Amino acid sequence: MNTHKTIIIGAGPAGYTAAIYAARADLQPVLIAGREPGGQLMTTSEVENWPGDPDGVYGSELMDRMRKQAEKFGTKVVLDEVVEVDFSVNPLVVKTANEEYHAQSVIVATGASAMWLGIPGEADLKGKGVSACATCDGFFFRDKKVVVVGGGDSALEEATFLTKFASEITILVRRDEFRASAAMQKRALNNPKIKVMWHSSPTALVGTEKLEAVKIINNENGEESEIMADGFFASIGHKPNTDIFAGQLELDQKGYIVCKPDSTATSAAGVFVSGDVADPWYRQAITAAGTGCQAALEAERFLSAKE
């Protein structure tokens, strides 16, 4: 069995950028695209904050262009899903549903998945007023009414960010208190654009071509209501896609991969990480791409030092 110089797991902005840099460094990378090639950008309509695209670009189009660029420089893209890894051996082992690969280095770029509510209308209206990233999509809701779901720091941070654009933000909190820090609560509650509905949970999203309204139930008395809304943001957290790395790489309490200081290197020799799978804070396409570049450069240096 051939031992590849570099295998990249994941095909979002981080994985494709790592592939472009690795291929240009003659590492002949194999990129295993996974279940959702392109990552979260495939469910985003228009990306307006990608440098060099002043008119915006559709997420799916951007990912297609990055894939073609990676392939142009020699990346082999495999449409398969990694089901098991063994980073305790040399060469490193990466197993998919159909194949077993050996590699001198591995770049993990499996990303993170937004946690959704699973209510009627949510899946159909993603990208049509429904989002899980205010910093990605907030601009589209200038002078609009939006609803944010969640009671933690991320929900209040997103609601506060949305006040730059939206005319009115309603936060739905299923209990009678926030879980967010006191400072974040104070900032949100003091903003005149933000109002809070306690004991409230969304039960369905209404709309055809775009979001029109949110159906709500009061968890205390069972009373149902409906409010008009142009935007709906699920801010109940993200889950890093790291299940297959448990016991192989050091993970933090939330499941994100832990990097060495000022590096993309992980706890396993020859394994590097990029993108949202190690980033609970920024979660942007551009930051993911930046760490993909870093991971590829570090993998190249690691292999050069071995030689």
Image (cartoon, rainbow, N blue to C red):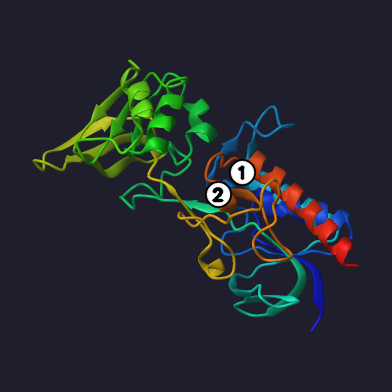
Q: Secondary structure at mark 2?
A: helix
Mark 1 = which residue? 59
Mark 1 near mark 2, Cβ–Cβ under 8 Å?
Answer: yes
Please provide percent x and percent y for residue 134.
47, 33
Q: Which label belongs to residue 40?
A: 2
For mark 1, give the secondary structure: helix
Q: Residue furthest bottom?
A: 1
Q: Is residue 133 left or right of residue 85?
A: left
Q: Nearer the viewer, mark 1 or mark 2?
A: 2
* Residue 107: quadrant of the picture: bottom right
Name the residue: 41% across, 25% down. Answer: 160
Pinpoint residue 212: horizontal percent, then vertical percent. 34, 33
Is residue 136 rendered to the left or right of residue 143? right
Residue 130 makes an appearance in the image: yes
Q: Nearer the viewer, residue 229 or 289?
A: 289
Q: Quadrant of residue 185?
A: top left
Residue 95 coordinates in the image, percent (x, y):
64, 77
Is 2 rendered above or below residue 245? below
What is the crowding at mark 2: few (fewer than 14 residues within 10 Å), some, or many (at least 20)?
A: some
